[in-house]
Amino acid sequence: MAAFPCMTIFLLVSSTLAQIVFSEIFKPHDYSKWPMPLCKMYYPLDPLYDANCPEVTAYVCATNGHTKNECFLCVDQWEFGPHIKFDKYGKCD
C-alpha cells in the first residue's frame, strides 16, 4: 500500500520536470537579441587570397536578399562594399 503513494509522487514530479525541460528546448528563439556576425574573423588576410567559407547551414539574410551563412555575408561585404549589410538570422523571405 505504501508503494502506491510513492509511485504517484514519482510520476507527478518526473512529468513536471520533463515539461520544464522540454518547454525550454522547444521554445521559439528571439533572433533579434542575438549579436551581429563578427566579420573580421572571416576577412581574407591578403587581397588576392580567396576566402574559404565552410558549407554551414546556419542561414543569415543580407540586405541584398541573399541567404547565406555568416562567412559568405562577411566576404560579400568585404568584396562588394558596405552597402551589403546583415538583415536577420534565418532565411530571407
Image: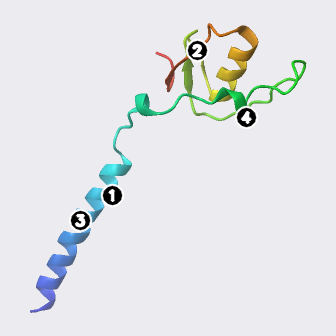
List x then y, in percent, for residue 25. 38, 50
- Between the C-alphas of marks 3 and 1, the distance is 10 Å
Return the residue at label 4. Answer: 54
- Between the C-alphas of marks 1 and 4, the distance is 32 Å
- Between the C-alphas of marks 2 and 4, the distance is 20 Å
> Which disc number belongs to residue 15?
3
Do the residues under discs 1 and 2 have CB atoms within 8 angstroms?
A: no
Say which quarter of the image contains residue 30.
top left
List x then y, in percent, for residue 52. 80, 30
Q: Residue at x 36, y 46 (%)?
A: 26
Q: Amino acid at mark 4?
A: Pro
Return the residue at label 1. Answer: 21
Q: Nearer the viewer, mark 3 or mark 4?
A: 4
List x then y, in percent, for residue 13. 21, 71
Identify the secondary structure beneath mark 1. Answer: helix
- Between the C-alphas of marks 1 and 2, the distance is 36 Å
Tell me which label, 2 or 4, sits earlier in the chain.
4
